[in-house]
Every structure is written in C-alpha cells, then in structure tokens.
Image (spheres, rainbow, N blue to C red):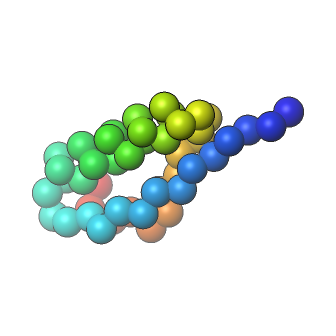
C-alpha cells in the first residue's frame, strides 16, 4: 500500500485564525494533489 504524504512549512504569527486559515488552504491543496496525510512540523501560535 502506498500513502502519499505532504509536509507544509508555515511562518505562523500571533493571529491564530490567520494561521489556521493558512493551514486549511495548504491542507486542501495537498489533498487535491492526492495527499492522505499533511504534517506541519514546528507550527507555533495555535
């Protein structure tokens, strides 16, 4: 079984809603590209 994963890098700021919106956009794009798992290592300010 092959599972496609994606890693996202986000420069998060103090605005938690903006951070989550960016994560949502990146995750949706990765899913459209076939990713079953998206990880955002090192994300701060959630």
Q: How many marks?
A: 0
Name the quadrant containing residue 37: top right
**Relative to 45, 40 lies left or right:** right
Instruction: Give the position of the C terminus as an image quadrant.
Output: bottom left
- Place of residue 21 in the rendered image (x, y in percent of width and height, measured from the top left): 24, 43
- Place of residue 15 in the rendered image (x, y in percent of width and height, measured from the top left): 14, 57
Q: Looking at the picture, does residue 12 appear above or below residue 1?
A: below
Residue occupying the far left of the picture: 15
Residue at image coords 73%, 38%: 3
Viewer-proximal residue, 28 or 19? 28
Residue at image coords 53%, 37%: 33
Instruction: Give the position of the N terminus as an image quadrant.
Output: top right
**Relative to 36, 10 lies left or right:** left
Residue at image coords 32%, 41%: 25
Q: Looking at the picture, does residue 5 appear above or below residue 15?
A: above
Viewer-proximal residue, 7 or 12? 7
- Place of residue 11 in the rendered image (x, y in percent of width and height, measured from the top left): 30, 68
Residue occupying the far right of the picture: 1
**Relative to 13, 6 lies left or right:** right
């Amino acid at each position: 079984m092959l599972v496609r994963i994606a890693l996202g890098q986000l420069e998060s700021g103090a605005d938690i809603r903006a951070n989550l919106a960016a994560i949502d956009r990146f995750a949706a794009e990765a899913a459209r590209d076939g990713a079953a798992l998206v990880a955002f290592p090192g994300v701060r300010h959630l």
